[in-house]
Amino acid sequence: MRSGTRIAVAAVAIGALAVPLVALATAREDGTSSTAPSFARDVAPVIADKCAGCHRSGGIAPFPLETASQISRQADAIPAVVEAGLMPPWPPGKLSPAYVAQDTRTLSSGQRAAVLAWALGGAKIDGPAGKPAAPQGPEVRAGETLLNLRMQAVYRPSAPRGVTDDYHCFLVDPKLTRSSFVTSARIEPGQPRIVHHVILFRVGPEQVAAARSLDARDAGPGWSCFGGTGLPAGDGTGITDSLNNANWIAAWAPGWGGNHLPDGTGVSLPAGSQIVMQVHYNLLNGRAPDRSRALLTTVPASENLRPLRTTLLPGPVELACAKGEHGKLCNRQAAVFELARKYGPTAAFAPAGLLILCRGSAASPVASAVSTCDRRITTPTTIYVAAGHMHLLGASIRLELNPGTSRAKVLLDIPRWDFHWQNAYTLEEPVQAGPGDVVRVTCRHDVTKRTHGGHGVPTTPRYVLWGEGTTDEMCLGILQVTRG
């Protein structure tokens, strides 16, 4: 949790804790409770296992929890965030299905009770903190090869005056002499504070020359690439194909780890392919030099894995200024021109394109805090992984199959969106879908988050559209599937 909101969240959650706190206090007073938890025996191992992986020096969390004194300083806030379910963060709500390794991200009832009882009982320190496991790359299984791919050189992000985002693409050569399948990916941003997200795109042998041309076009490492790599996506037959068969290998966003892909599946990487690493830098948090890297495991194509494909489900974003807000950018047309000014003319077409894709027409856009988009499935499909992506004004996101029917299934439901905790979730039971089935993404945004400030949310009133910048918005569902 970001330090700027920790106190506020704790204050709100304390109200909800009134009954649990009284119950715990009563139990201690009447002697019915068990022996008070020991920090060293009962609490330190939990914090080391569930918290310190992020709450460490140089980690994505705002303060470390690596020593007993560091943990003690946060003891007043711990009961509120644990009882409210904010920490450890597990965004999927109760409507979501079960996911692989879910239990490793959440507290058991016993762990939760021990942490609460220790914090509410005076947070006494009776020994050292536990040592968290050192960050590791992906497990290399038998038959796999590890590829360590790093940007060619250090890059210092920059942007024109008034622009707070830099999308930059870097061409990386894995030197593949044989066709392979990627079986896992772990992306490590060099500067987590300023890296908004990273996407690895596959560049087939037939596109390598074009990618090298883009790389040579700009001075310094890589090239500017708002909206995509600048290379064709899918098989070139149209926008729907580029969304159904996005050339993604893997992605990273804050809170996102890296795991092996579902057993028996892999992302195809033909011999001679290269990789574009697209890094989105959020310059609201600085302009430090970066050299991100990716660790991939691969197996030979002869393993005959099922090709895993990425399907993107974007929805239009049309957010009017809140009631009582005024400003020149509250006008939608002015907001469209602002997109073009910041990111180029192509960016100004995205809002209209999404309206046509999802609503059938862009003639009369209607502002709404709720955005939805349906995609009809045309071939037998197995859904393995679900993820969602929004920016700073996001409130909730849901991905579902056949909504409103007797065959409805929720693939992912995040009822309380937090930009700083994003992940891809592998379904414990893959979902089968077929021709005629419909996948829907539904996003809810909250423009009042702008007036609350914090997290870099811009306070200037404006009509918010789909855009590439951190201060713009997105509504994006992501599925990893096999077909046939």
Image (spheres, rainbow, N blue to C red):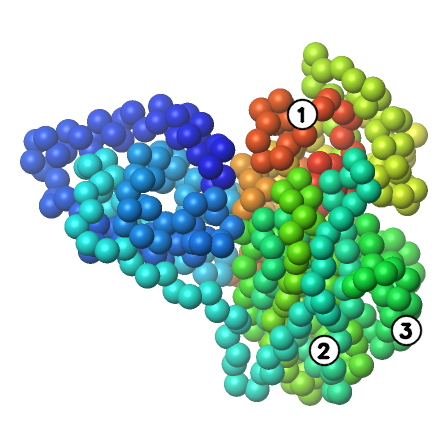
**Residue under circle 3?**
209
For disc 2, the marked residue is 174
Please state the horizontal and vertical placement of residue 460, each as a whole percent of the image: 71, 24
Residue 430 in view (yes/no):
no
Q: Quadrant of residue 219?
A: bottom right
Measured as percent of width and height from the top left, residue 11 is found at: 39, 26
Q: Which mark is residue 459?
A: 1
Residue sitting farthest toward the top: 324
Label 3 is placed on what type of residue? Ala
Q: Judging from the image, what secondary structure is the residue with disc 3 in?
A: helix
Q: Quadrant of residue 210?
A: bottom right
Q: Is residue 445 left or right of residue 28?
A: right
Q: Quadrant of residue 395?
A: top right
Q: Is residue 362 visible?
A: yes
Which of pointers 3 and 1 lies earlier in the amino acid sequence? 3
* Residue at x 24% of width, y 46% of height: 114
**Label 2, residues with CA under 10 Å away: few <14, some 14-19, many ≥20:** some
